Image (spheres, grey):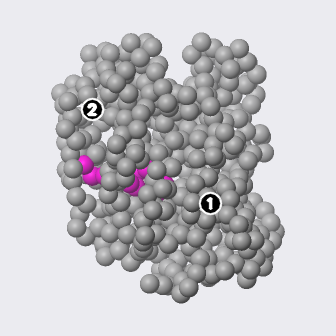
């Protein structure tokens, strides 16, 4: 809940509501990107890595940073916990 | 260097440790105790244990585990408040997984679920809002907690609910803020902290300027850090270098993620929705002035405390618990009389045992005896 999880923005779904599809370790989820993009520049986000906190992108990071963070989160067991919550949330 | 081989770059880890060892003799040490470096963030605490950082650094440096795990400082009365609302007829009660296991005086939210309350774990507050849209005949309540990392998410969710006029959605706000917490900690005469490793993802939201009082008023170094073990060793080195050079400043080891001014869009959402409370209760620490926020009156319809006329419960921690002394750094977790006996991760009494980011759970999980540092009191 407190550590950000890296995800890759794959598609803008609703520009008015700042909703994008973001892929995290093979799981795609709807994410709010209002904190990392201007309304007219949402398309620039596609293909970028972002740090996610409970369904919201909070920072744009580079690919190397994303890979390092994913590795540490996996070793700490935090990624698995977040992914389980994410899958659960998807069917809520 | 038992764990260094697990690091992404073991050579880099070894070189950082050599630099730490080389800098330490130039640091003026406190009398009769090791140097106390507090990592504020629960994620850092977890990282320290996972990578055995305490064992990698010289014995004269001791990590003190700070209060930065919002689940760990959740007071029992607040859990009772949640259960009171969750047990109202027609309510669907939602929150993050960690919060569900924290015990109150009538058990945890998981226990309330077992007794028949409709309690659901969600990944995001947006999932709770989506449940509300799908269940218009039910009242959906989200228990919002966390430091500034989760505050923008709950604020934006609430703004979305207001925008869409979702009438059956509301939130219990238990957000707490990091700066007043650090102020209270430093003002406490029992606190013996020589320098800080500052939180990364909180700072990503709030920026670094709010920490300036720490070097300015207290003369302590404060280095914002990532939570990769190499980041933390680097941040520790930066703290020691400041001490060796006789200076104290806010520095940013994690500049690749943390902008100096934080995230303006996130701060705007936070300030739109929340205002300071006069004081907030913390498990183990008592009441800290201005350390928490509540939902502004403009959004009263979305505030579950107002909607349900909640009278907040005040419950003392179990007498056996010594969470407060552990959070302040006065006791190591296994020096608590309940540690590993009445209080374990399977049967947590204190909140520090609940979350994987709590100091007690980390000690328990990663082997208390192996990690035990001598008692210097």
Q: How crowded is mark 2: few (under 14 residues within 10 Å), some or many (20 or more)?
A: many
| In-front residue for pair B92/B161 | B161
Q: Which residue is drawn at 48% across and 84% down?
A: B376
- Give the percent coordinates (x, y) of residue B344: 35, 66
Report, in whole angstroms, how far the alpha carbon at label 2 lies from the one at label 1: 38 Å
Camera-near label (2 vs 1) is 1
Secondary element at tag 2? helix
Horizontal arrangement in the rendering, residue B239 relative to residue B352 (left or right): right
Q: Is residue B10 magenta?
A: no
State which region is magenta.
B67-77
Q: Residues within 10 Å of mark 1 (few under 14, many from 20)?
A: some
Name which of mark 2 and mark 1 comes first in the sequence: 1
Quarter in which the C terminus of chain B is drawn: bottom left
Quarter in which the N terminus of chain B is drawn: bottom right
Same chain for the residues at labels 2 and 1, yes or no? yes
Residue A64 position by quadrant: top right
Residue B18 position by quadrant: bottom right
Instruction: Count up the numbered dots.
Output: 2
Name the disc covering residue B305, or none.
Answer: 2
- Give the percent coordinates (x, y) of residue B248: 67, 63
């Amino acid at each position: 809940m407190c550590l950000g999880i890296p995800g890759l923005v794959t598609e803008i779904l609703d520009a008015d509501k700042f909703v994008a599809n973001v892929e995290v370790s093979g799981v795609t989820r709807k994410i709010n990107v209002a904190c990392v993009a201007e309304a007219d520049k949402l398309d620039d986000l596609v293909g970028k890595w972002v740090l996610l906190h409970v369904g919201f992108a909070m920072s744009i990071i580079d690919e190397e940073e994303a890979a390092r963070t994913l590795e540490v989160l996996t070793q700490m067991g935090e990624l698995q916990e977040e992914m389980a919550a994410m899958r659960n949330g998807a069917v809520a | 260097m038992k764990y260094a081989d697990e690091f992404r770059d073991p050579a880099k880890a070894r070189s950082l440790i050599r630099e730490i060892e080389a800098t330490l003799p130039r640091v003026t040490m406190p009398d009769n105790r090791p140097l106390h470096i507090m990592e504020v963030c629960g994620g850092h605490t977890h990282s320290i244990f996972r990578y055995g950082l305490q064992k990698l650094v010289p014995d004269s440096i001791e990590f003190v585990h700070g209060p930065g795990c919002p689940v760990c400082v959740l007071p029992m009365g607040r859990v009772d408040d949640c259960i009171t609302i969750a047990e109202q007829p027609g309510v669907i009660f939602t929150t993050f997984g960690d919060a569900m296991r924290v015990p109150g005086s009538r058990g945890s939210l998981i226990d309330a679920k077992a007794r028949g309350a409709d309690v659901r774990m969600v990944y995001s507050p947006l999932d709770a809002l989506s449940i509300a849209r799908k269940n218009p005949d039910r009242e959906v309540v989200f228990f919002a907690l966390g430091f500034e990392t989760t505050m923008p998410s709950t604020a934006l969710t609430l703004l979305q609910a207001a925008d869409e006029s979702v009438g059956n959605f509301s939130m219990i706000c238990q957000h707490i803020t990091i700066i007043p917490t650090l102020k209270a900690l430093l003002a406490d005469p029992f606190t013996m902290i020589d320098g800080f490793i500052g939180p990364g993802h909180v700072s990503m939201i709030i920026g670094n300027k709010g920490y300036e009082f720490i070097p300015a008023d207290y003369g302590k170094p404060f280095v914002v850090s990532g939570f990769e073990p190499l980041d933390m060793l680097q941040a520790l080195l930066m703290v020691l270098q400041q001490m060796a050079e006789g200076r104290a400043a806010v520095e940013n080891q994690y500049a690749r993620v943390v902008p100096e001014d934080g995230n303006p869009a996130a701060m705007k959402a936070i300030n739109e929705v929340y205002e300071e409370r006069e004081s907030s209760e913390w498990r183990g620490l008592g009441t800290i002035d201005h350390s928490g926020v509540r939902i502004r009156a403009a959004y009263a319809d979305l505030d579950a405390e107002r909607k349900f006329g909640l009278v907040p419960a005040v419950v003392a921690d179990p007498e056996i618990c010594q969470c407060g002394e552990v959070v302040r750094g006065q006791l190591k977790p296994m020096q608590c009389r309940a540690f590993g006996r009445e209080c374990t991760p399977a049967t947590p009494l204190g909140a520090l045992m609940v979350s994987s980011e709590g100091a007690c759970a980390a000690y328990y999980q990663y082997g208390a005896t192996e990690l035990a540092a001598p008692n210097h009191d």
